[in-house]
């Protein structure tokens, strides 16, 4: 039988989904599972979006333009103006989710063997997209004890060589919830300018910033306009993960032309998804405020609750709706699996994402998990109580050792 490709062998399993069979088996046994493992918001999609979906009046569900509908791109220009990001419709290419935007960015800008510097822990699928493009991820470590702040510029320069082609950031960050400061963004800008690198900036969580510090987009950085490729998505801000609509944004015409070749090969972004996404731009500010306020309360519930559990530590995330927490366990992946296969408290258990899957450095994050605060506060509080009971019962606990 023919073997699978090297890419197929090297492609990492998702740390977010790899425990799904254990969760399914737990549910079959009648155990209630609190899902803290995946960033799937439980808040309702905006009514204007649902109305647009219900009222699709087309008699033919046709291909859309490969770049995405012009009406949607024009309307997006107004949305970005609200964040002091000044674009033309032609700067925007609509993609099948933010994931496709990352993949097309890599395919258009990187040659096989080119290296991308990425702060870790990082969204696990970046590694998968790099493997697909034949590129190499070089990680620069951030630590939970320093709140995942970026290291000094010298640490970046230690990684830069003749194969270095880009820096990739996620701001606010998934999985840590970290928000890059103006100083850190200027540091990245200076590196990009000095070494003439691309800056891929995943900014899908810009609506969820919980500090007085300003949101600094890569598009705000002066002097590197043609180096920046912005990644965006409607999945999280409108609770529309399933419509698969993202965007790749750049002032660099040459990059856009290359990306369009890949866009034409996949024909078109989702038709219905674009209709829903365009309508979503009319979402009332009241909806956005209510969603924001809810996440603020959930963040407080989760972080306060985690840090009250003996041996557990989580820094305070300043954005997105995730945190990485350190647990008093020998191995977080084993613990997460054990919670699903061997443990329940009063018929309930928790599902978390082992954080080691968000690192590429061997051994990093071995005692950490990523948690998403996408459940209502009552469920979060109960999940925290069940987690505390699990840590008390786990044979591999490090408390008192």
Image (cartoon, rainbow, N blue to C red):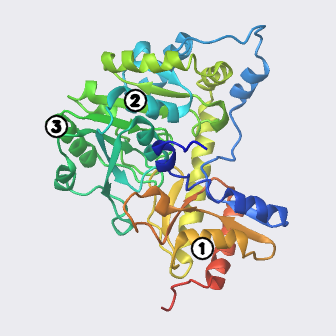
Label 2 with label 3: CB-CB less than 8 Å: no
Q: Position of residue 76 (x, y in %)?
A: 50, 21
Under circle 2, the secondary element is helix
Of the image marks 2 and 3, the number of the one nearer the N terminus: 2
Seen from this angle, which residue lies furthest front?
1
Judged by depth in the image, the label closer to the viewer, 2 or 3, is: 2
Of the image marks 1 and 2, the number of the one nearer the N terminus: 2
Q: Quadrant of residue 301?
A: bottom right
Disc 3 packing (10 Å; few <14; some 14–19; many ≥20): some
Does residue 176 appear anywhere in the picture? no
Real-space Cα separation, disc 1 to disc 2, in angstroms: 37 Å
Real-space Cα separation, disc 3 to disc 1, in angstroms: 43 Å
What is the total number of numbered labels drawn onto the structure image? 3
Does 290 appear above or below 389?
A: above
- Residue 335 is marked as 1
**Relative to 110, 163 lies left or right:** left
Judged by depth in the image, the label closer to the viewer, 1 or 2, is: 2
- Residue 107 is marked as 2
Does residue 150 appear anywhere in the picture? yes
- Residue 144 is marked as none
Q: Position of residue 122 (x, y in %)?
A: 42, 52
Seen from this angle, which residue lies furthest top?
59
Q: Please report the residue visible at 31 percent of the width from the left and 20 percent of the height from the top.
A: 252
Does 216 appear above or below 90?
A: below
Of residue 350 and residue 24, the one placed in the foreground of this image is: 24
Q: Please report the residue visible at 68 percent of the width from the left and 10 percent of the height from the top.
A: 62
Q: Would you name the residue on which mark 3 appears? A: 195
Label 1 with label 2: CB-CB less than 8 Å: no
Disc 1 packing (10 Å; few <14; some 14–19; many ≥20): many
Real-space Cα separation, disc 2 to disc 3, in angstroms: 20 Å
Q: Position of residue 77 (x, y in %)?
A: 45, 19
Label 3 with label 1: CB-CB less than 8 Å: no
């Amino acid at each position: 039988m023919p073997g699978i490709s090297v890419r197929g062998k090297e492609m990492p399993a998702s740390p977010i989904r790899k425990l799904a069979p254990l969760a399914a088996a737990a549910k079959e046994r009648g155990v209630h599972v609190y899902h803290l493992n995946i960033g799937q918001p439980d808040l309702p999609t905006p009514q204007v979006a649902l109305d647009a979906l219900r009222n699709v009046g087309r008699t033919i569900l046709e291909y859309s333009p490969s770049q995405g509908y012009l009406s949607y791109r024009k309307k997006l220009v107004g949305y970005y103006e609200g964040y002091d990001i000044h674009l033309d419709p032609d700067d925007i290419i609509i993609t099948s989710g933010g994931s496709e935007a990352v993949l097309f960015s890599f395919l258009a800008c990187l040659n096989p063997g080119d290296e991308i510097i990425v702060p870790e822990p990082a969204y696990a699928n970046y590694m998968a997209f790099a493997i697909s493009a034949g590129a190499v991820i070089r990680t620069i470590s951030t630590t939970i004890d320093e709140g995942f702040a970026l290291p000094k510029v010298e640490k970046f320069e230690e990684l830069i060589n003749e194969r270095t082609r880009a820096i990739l950031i996620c701001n606010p960050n998934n999985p840590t919830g970290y928000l890059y400061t103006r100083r850190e963004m200027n540091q990245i800008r200076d590196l990009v300018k000095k070494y003439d690198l691309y800056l891929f900036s995943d900014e899908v969580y810009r609506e969820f910033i919980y500090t007085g510090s300003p949101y600094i987009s890569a598009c705000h950085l002066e002097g590197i306009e043609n180096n920046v490729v912005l990644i965006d998505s409607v999945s999280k801000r409108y609770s529309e993960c399933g419509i698969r609509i993202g965007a790749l944004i750049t002032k660099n015409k040459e990059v856009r032309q290359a990306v369009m070749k890949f866009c034409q090969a996949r024909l078109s972004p989702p038709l219905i998804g674009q209709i829903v996404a365009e309508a979503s731009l009319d979402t009332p500010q009241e909806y956005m405020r209510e969603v924001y306020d809810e996440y603020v309360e959930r963040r407080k519930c989760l972080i306060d609750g985690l840090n009250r559990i003996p041996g557990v530590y989580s820094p305070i995330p300043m954005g997105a709706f995730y945190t990485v927490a350190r647990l008093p366990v020998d191995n977080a992946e084993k613990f997460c699996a054990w919670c699903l296969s061997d443990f329940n408290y009063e018929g309930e258990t928790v599902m978390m994402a082992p954080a080691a899957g968000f690192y590429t450095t061997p051994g990093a994050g071995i005692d950490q998990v990523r948690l998403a605060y996408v459940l209502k506060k009552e469920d979060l509080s109960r999940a925290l109580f069940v987690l505390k009971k699990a840590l008390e019962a786990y044979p591999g606990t490090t408390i008192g050792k």
